Amino acid sequence: MRISIDRGLCEGNAVCEALAPLTFDLDENDQARVLAEALRPDGEVSEDHRALVERAVDGCPRLAISVTDQP
Ligand code: SF4
C-alpha cells in the first residue's frame, strides 16, 4: 500500500504517530511523515502495517492521510 499525507491539512497533533508509531512520526516542522524504516525500496509500505495505518487514517482529525493500493 502507498500512504499519502496532505501536508496542507496536517496540523501536527501526532495522533497518527500515537496510533501507528512504527509507520508515522513528525518532522522538524511538526508535519507528519512516513518513517523511512516503514518504506520498502519501491515506496510502498508493508501490509504488516495495515491494521494500525487504517486506525491512523480513521483517527486523523484532519483527514490528512490516505492509502492507495496498486491493482
Ligand atoms: S493525525 Fe493527521 S493531522 Fe495529526 S499529525 Fe497525523 S496526519 Fe497530521
Image (spheres, rainbow, N blue to C red):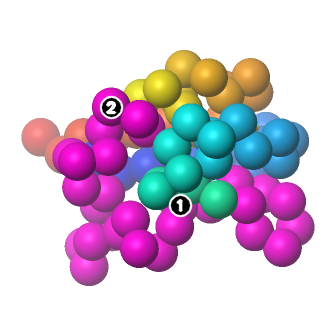
Q: Image quadrant of residue 65? A: top right
Residue 6 visible in rendering: yes
User: Which residue has dot 1 on it?
Assistant: 34
Q: Camera-side residue: 62 or 50?
A: 50
What range is drawn magenta here? Answer: 26-53
Which numbered disc covers residue 51? Answer: 2
Vertical placement of 66 versus 41: above or below?
A: above
- Residue 51 lies, in percent from the top left, at 33, 31
Secondary structure under badge 2?
Answer: helix
- Magenta span contains residue 51: yes
Vertical placement of 55 versus 13: above or below?
A: above
- Residue 23 lies, in percent from the top left, at 47, 55
On the picture, is 35 further left or further right than 50? right
Q: Amino acid at mark 2?
A: Ala
Q: Image quadrant of residue 62? A: top right
Quadrant of the image containing the C terminus: top left
Neighbour class for label 1 at 10 Å: few (<14), some, many (≥20)?
many
The CB of the residue at mark 1 lies under 8 Å from ligand 1: no
Name the residue: 27% across, 71% down.
40
Name the residue: 73% across, 60% down.
26
- Residue 66 lies, in percent from the top left, at 49, 36
Name the residue: 83% across, 41% down.
13
Residue lying furthest bottom: 41
Q: Nearer the viewer, mark 1 or mark 2?
A: 2
